Image (cartoon, rainbow, N blue to C red):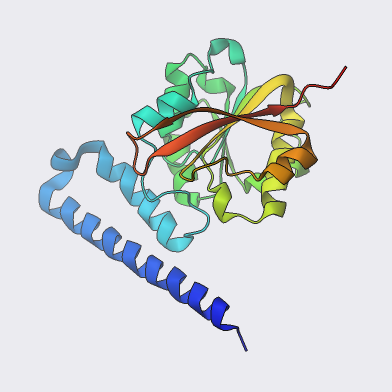
Amino acid sequence: MPSIKVIKTQYRAEKRKMYYMEIYRETLAAGSQTGRKGLGGKLSDLLPFLREFVRDPRGVASIAPSGRALASLITQEISFRTGPVIELGPGTGAITHALIARGVRERDLTLVEYGSDFARLLQMRFPQARVLWMDAAALDRHVLFPNGSVGAVVCGLGLLNMDERKVAAILHGAFRYLRPDGAFFLYTYGKRCSVPEPLLDALGLQATRIGRTIRNIPPAGVYRLSRRPFAG
């Protein structure tokens, strides 16, 4: 028989899911009343997020795409000189657009997306990019690049919602492909880095806060993960 704690957790999860299903229905209704002209591209981006969130609340970091301020902040250290970039959980491509605006060539982008609706949308929006419909935790099980050849990894996944073993698998796979000077960029809605310090220690990584923006729903902080320098 499940414990009271488990029952309460399941109840809260179900209540949260019902809440977002109601938002989804209201958004659909708003779209039918105002038409695409009234809501523009925002509605077309919001609906896939809501569908995926209702389908898998723990697997989607947010119910809405990243805002421009967050996309600009998380990509500010990336340029055409970075070379190949992997994006984990690009969703509808808000940060992908920002990467291209920074000078990253579309053909140098590998977009790893687990949501089927998102993956199809990304293939249409970024035809020159490599779009992989797969779990980011499986990065280490495939040969996507020669080891140590990627300049940056940008993560839009809800790491706080994942167990530590899955987060470790994602980081291990990502740093397998990153150059020695490469970095893993992530954002979080929490007050501190979404990768626990003991896990960073175990993987030989360090987290540096780049900044925070309140011009996002919800406000978010951005961190850079990099390899710790060897003591000489």
In depth, the one of 187 and 34 nearer the eye is 187
Q: Which of the 4 image quarters holds residue 125? A: top left
Residue lying farthest bottom? Answer: 1
Residue at the image position 51 percent from the left and 58 percent from the top = 58
| Horizontal and vertical percent position of residue 46 | 32, 47
| Horizontal and vertical percent position of residue 23 | 27, 60
Residue at the image position 23 percent from the left and 56 percent from the top = 28
Relative to residue 101, is residue 187 depicted above or below?
Answer: below
Left of 217 or right of it: where is 119?
A: right
Q: Is residue 31 visible?
A: yes
| Horizontal and vertical percent position of residue 182 | 68, 22
Q: Which of the 4 image quarters holds residue 19? A: bottom left
Residue lying farthest right? Answer: 232
Left of 76 or right of it: where is 193?
A: right
Relative to residue 186, is residue 63 depicted above or below?
Answer: below
Residue at the image position 65 percent from the left and 56 percent from the top = 163
In depth, the one of 7 and 93 nearer the eye is 7
> Which quadrant of the rendered structure holds the N terminus?
bottom right
| Horizontal and vertical percent position of residue 218 | 36, 44
In depth, the one of 97 and 16 nearer the eye is 16
Left of 226 or right of it: where is 29?
A: left
Q: Is residue 142 visible?
A: no
> Which quadrant of the rendered structure holds the C terminus?
top right
Left of 134 or right of it: where is 63?
A: left
Residue at the image position 52 percent from the left and 80 percent from the top = 7
